Image: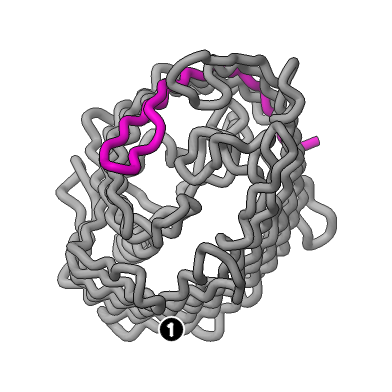
Amino acid sequence: MRQAAFLALLGSCAFAAPALAQQSDATDGLGSVESENPFGRDRNVSVLERRRPDYAPEPVRIGTIELMPRMAVGAGYDDNLYAQPDDRIGDAYLRIRPKISLVRPSPNLKLSLDGELDLLRYAGRTSENATQYALNAGALYTISKSDTLNLSVRNGRYSQERVSPDSPTQASRPIRFTLSEGTATYTHVFNRLRVRGVLNVENRNYADSVTPGGAPIDQDFRDHTTYTGTAIGEYALSPSIALFVAGSLNRRDYRERAGPVPARDSSGFELAGGASFELGRKARGALRLGYLRQDYKPAAFEDVSGFLVRGELAYFLTPLVTITGTIGRGIRETGVNGATGYLATNMTLRADYELLRNLILGVGGELEKRDFNNIDRRDDRWTWRASGSYLLSKRMALRLDLQRRTQSSWGATAGRRFADNRISVGVTFSGL
């Protein structure tokens, strides 16, 4: 349990990044509803983590290499494509997402490489079409029984979703951006004590857009590189509970520029403590509490600080029903003019039901509260989702996804109020 709990709390270290895809749909996760139980738990395994050998895709082995091809094809309908309060415009779409993964297993040096292409095509509104891709590579080096080094890099091109508050409403096409990221993680274990250091560098480069009349919409002011260093120390009191402290420093460097929006360079830190735990065979989770602060270099920008809370609790109502709740609070960058960023609080609640061994149903909701810095604006964004995954075989899975997203906004510079509904179906083919 110690390893599982620690990895769970590590996953809650970084505040979730903004969505990269054009909203969620039935092709998400390429149809997979199984995480292969990566932590090796023998109890308190959630519905989505449970092993299903009869339906788990099997890689193709070529010598020492494991090859896993996947192809997800989905179709759907969005009834408010431009996320407008009135004059809603809907459209149907087709989404094709091929992906290939290569893994070289090894007890000392595990290597992985995967690439995904995401083709999104609309029936009538071709300006919303997007061609996205992502390339990821990783290396896990087991130095000794006590020391491991994990390296990962990724590069991708994405299209910002129209429902995002950072998306300019007057843009004639979605904002495109590229993301490059590298992470190095070193872990050392000494008896009950585990320490981990993480270095992360992320670069984002946004492309300009135009209005329907052809006037340019500048997005260069959003280009930036973020450097983050994190240290975590965990001490296991027992097999069921561990205490930890965590701290991080970050620096956010924007491109030098001349214009109405000065560079929003800043530095900040987070400091927190908490525990990861198991409550018998009914629940497991992690909770951290602390303080966060972001100081902006330009004197005209206000600094951001506040209470930090992040946590997750999985409750096993029955062996076939898992209820999961999460909460997170952190500082995010934004593309809203005049704002330096916003303090975001996310709360989610989800239930997953294994109706049959190969039929998994899910329903959940999320509330994201955004308190923008340097301008008078507050947003509440609700997202409701229901989904079903039907595993036909090792090579084929069907999925249905329903989503409703709403936004309310207040303040002197309030944003849009809208409701958006999306329905989609998809099929995923895995292996050869």
| Rendered image quadrant of residue 21 | top right
- In the image, residue 188 sits, relative to residue 128, either above or below, namely below
- In the image, residue 157 sits, relative to residue 111, either above or below, namely above
Residue 370 position in % (x across, y down): 31, 46
| Rendered image quadrant of residue 249 | bottom left
Residue wearing tag 1: 146
* Magenta residue check for 412: yes
Tag 1: amino acid: Ser
Q: Residue at x 72, y 63 (%)?
A: 104
Q: Nearer the viewer, residue 230 or 293?
A: 293
Residue 69 position in % (x across, y down): 76, 42
* Magenta residue check for 54: no
Q: Residue at x 72, y 44 (%)?
A: 132
Q: Nearer the viewer, residue 295 or 198?
A: 295
Q: State whether the magenta stretch is mostly helix, strand or loop.
A: strand
- In the image, residue 56 sits, relative to residue 227, either above or below, namely above
Residue 136 position in % (x across, y down): 68, 59
Q: Quadrant of the C terminus?
A: top right
- In the image, residue 431 sits, relative to residue 2, either above or below, namely above
Q: Nearer the viewer, residue 212 or 239?
A: 212
Residue 221 position in % (x across, y down): 57, 62
Does the rendering let one see residue 369? no
Magenta highlight range: 404-432
Q: Secondary structure at mark 1?
A: loop
Does the rendering let one see residue 151? yes
Q: Residue at x 74, y 16 (%)?
A: 124
